[in-house]
Amino acid sequence: MTQRLILMFAVLTVGTASAVDYKSQIAPIFRNKCYACHSVTKKVKGKLALDDDKLSEQIGPGKNIIPGEAMKSTMYINCTLPDDDADVMPPEGKNKLTAAELDLLKAWIAEGASLTAGGAAPAPATPAAATTMPAAGGDGPLMKWTSSDGKLIEAHFMGLQADGVLLKMPATGVTHIVPLTRLSPESQTQAKTATK
């Protein structure tokens, strides 16, 4: 967990860096471990195709990959089940994901399951999904945020969304969804009480 927090805050503090890159880290896992059963080039079991051009259909609320919520994502859950579970993927313990691959998958989902060049996906701009959103056309206040392991960043508070805080990086202008659990208790309170 600590290593992933360091990676996440590295993403937030260095605009072009990324914690988990889909193309170089996640796509190879899918190709090597999942395509035998879940690719339009081979076969598509369970209506689940993980090809680059089909994967976006599996990402979103109520789908196999729920951005920001690895522990609620069927994709991650099924890959972590015991070998004798009927729903384990890959089935029958064949070509099972390594601990490092599972960590990458979990971190990628937690960061927003971006299909672009690594890091967290930009936050959706759907006001109905957010608890608090910025005033039209404006950035939220520039505030200091601390991770649960003490790393400090400055970012614009853009609002709350489910169990995450929307932080816009001043250097890149990209808004990231950071799970509240990755913030210190003080920063969690700050997020919950911040107003626009």
Image (cartoon, grey):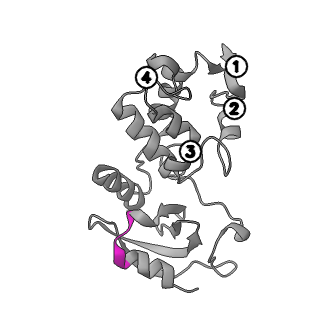
Which comes sooner in the sequence, label 2 or label 4? 2
Q: In this view, does 45 lie above or below 115?
A: above
Marks 3,2: beta carbons within 8 A = no
Crowd tier of the residue under label 2, counting other residues whose Cα lies within 10 Å: few below 14, some 14–19, many 20 or above: few
Query: Could you tell me if the residues under marks 1 and 2 are in contact, i.e. CB atoms within 8 Å?
Result: yes
Label drawn at residue 73? 3
Percent coordinates x, y for residue 158 in the rendering:
56, 74
Q: What element carries label 3?
A: loop
Q: Quadrant of the C terminus?
A: bottom right
- Tell me the distance, in whole angstroms, between the alpha carbons under discs 3 and 4: 18 Å
Query: Mark 1 — residue?
Result: 40
What residue range appears in magenta?
Answer: 182-186
Residue plotted at (27% across, 64% down): 149
Q: Distance between the residues labelled 3 and 1?
A: 22 Å
Please report contact status of discs 4 and 1: CB closer than 8 Å, yes or no.
Answer: no
What residue type is disc 3 on?
Ser
Judge by depth and name the residue closer to the eye, 90 or 2: 90
* Precedes in sequence: disc 3 or disc 4: 3
User: Label 4 belongs to which residue?
Assistant: 96
- What residue is drawn where x is 42% and y is 75%? 188
3 relative to 90 in the view: left or right: left
Question: Which residue is tagged 2?
Answer: 54
